[in-house]
Image (tube, rainbow, N blue to C red):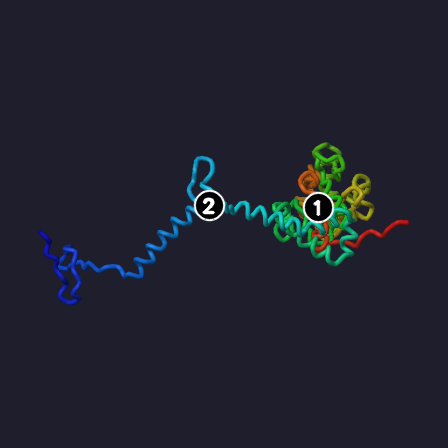
Amino acid sequence: MAKNIEKDEISGTPTTGHEWDGIKELNTPLPKWWLYTFYGTVIWAIGYTIAYPAWPLLSSATPGLLGYSSRQQVAEQIEAGKAAQKENLDKIASMSVDDILKDPNLLAFAQAGGAAAFKINCVQCHGSGAAGSAGYPNLNDDDWLWGGTPDAIYVTLKNGIRYTANAETRDSQMPAFGADGILTPEQVTDVATYVVSLSGGEADQAKVQAGQQIFAENCASCHGDNAKGNRDFGSPNLTDQIALYGASLDQVKAQVTRPRHGVMPGWSHRLDDATIKQLAVYVHSLGGGEAAAPATQ
């Protein structure tokens, strides 16, 4: 026997028979356009799973009748990008960094490539803006331990600094004057006071005079009589108010007593020569790069 369906008096719409607190639920049908759209999406989904990769399997997925692969598409795009760059990369690999700087097109290409390589390999230590931090050099200024010419930067990047895995690495070691007993604690304080005075810091003049003599006898052989450093040894300039490990008296004393020696990897073990040259071009362009050394006859 058919159930009597009650209709709403106002709208004339059948009710579901549900009622709460005197409020009856209307059995309003869905709009036909919504139903047709829903049915269309179901048909589309079935067609999609047949045509494209969709259903996961144990070690792969259903390939789909069209054989489309997003990974394959990305791989093809990467290969196309490499092919487009190959001509410039081959030129960079065969040229010196100095010659790359003379070619406007290659220079722009190398700076862009070097910036990308820097963000992947160098920002962890030198920062995203290459400003460095305590123990990590600022690459934007004109203070260089081993030289700021394009070729000098390239050699540093390629071979590293105190990187024992590369026999050609740049290397220098400052003696532990305090820890090894070469200087007494009082002498360490005197020479540190002298070093602080070289960059304009406040210092006890009596200790400065005593420290100057100690410096001449123990430090000038590397840092120079004028304390402006020596790039052959990677010895820093002590007069320019730039200090890798700090310029206060206590910080300088700590470095004289037991010096810290930073390590930078030689990138030839990880990057190809063209990428290292692009990095050298990019670092040279940051603001502190020096002119190339004049050619010798």
Q: Position of residue 152 (x, y in %)?
A: 77, 47
Q: Give me the disc on residue 65.
A: 2
Q: Secondary structure at mark 2?
A: loop
Q: Secondary structure at mark 1?
A: helix
Q: Is residue 290 left or right of residue 121?
A: right
Q: Position of residue 100 (x, y in %)?
A: 76, 53
**Marks 1 and 2, how far apart at CA:** 45 Å
Count neighbours of disc 2 (C-alpha within 10 A) and say few if under 14, some if 14 to 19, many if 20 or more.
Answer: few
Q: Cβ–Cβ below 8 Å for labels 1 and 2? A: no
Q: Give me the disc on residue 193.
A: none
Residue occupying the far left of the picture: 1
**Number of numbered discs:** 2
Residue occupying the far front of the picture: 65
For the question of whether residue 194 can be seen, the reply is no
Q: Is residue 191 left or right of residue 296?
A: left
Q: Position of residue 9 (x, y in %)?
A: 13, 65
For the question of whether residue 58 can be seen, the reply is yes
Of marks 1 and 2, the one in the foreground: 2
Q: Position of residue 178 (x, y in %)?
A: 71, 35
Count neighbours of disc 1 (C-alpha within 10 A) and say few if under 14, some if 14 to 19, many if 20 or more.
Answer: many
Q: Nearer the viewer, residue 291 or 101?
A: 101
Q: Is residue 36 above or below residue 215?
A: below
Residue at x 80%, y 53% (from the top left corner):
292
Residue occupying the far bottom of the picture: 10
Tell me which amino acid carries mark 2. Leu
Tell me which amino acid carries mark 1. Ile
**Residue of label 1:** 276
Residue at x 45%, y 41% (from the top left corner):
62
Residue at x 68%, y 51% (from the top left corner):
85
Asked where in the image residue 231 lies, by quadrant, the reply is: top right
Q: Nearer the viewer, residue 113 or 132?
A: 113
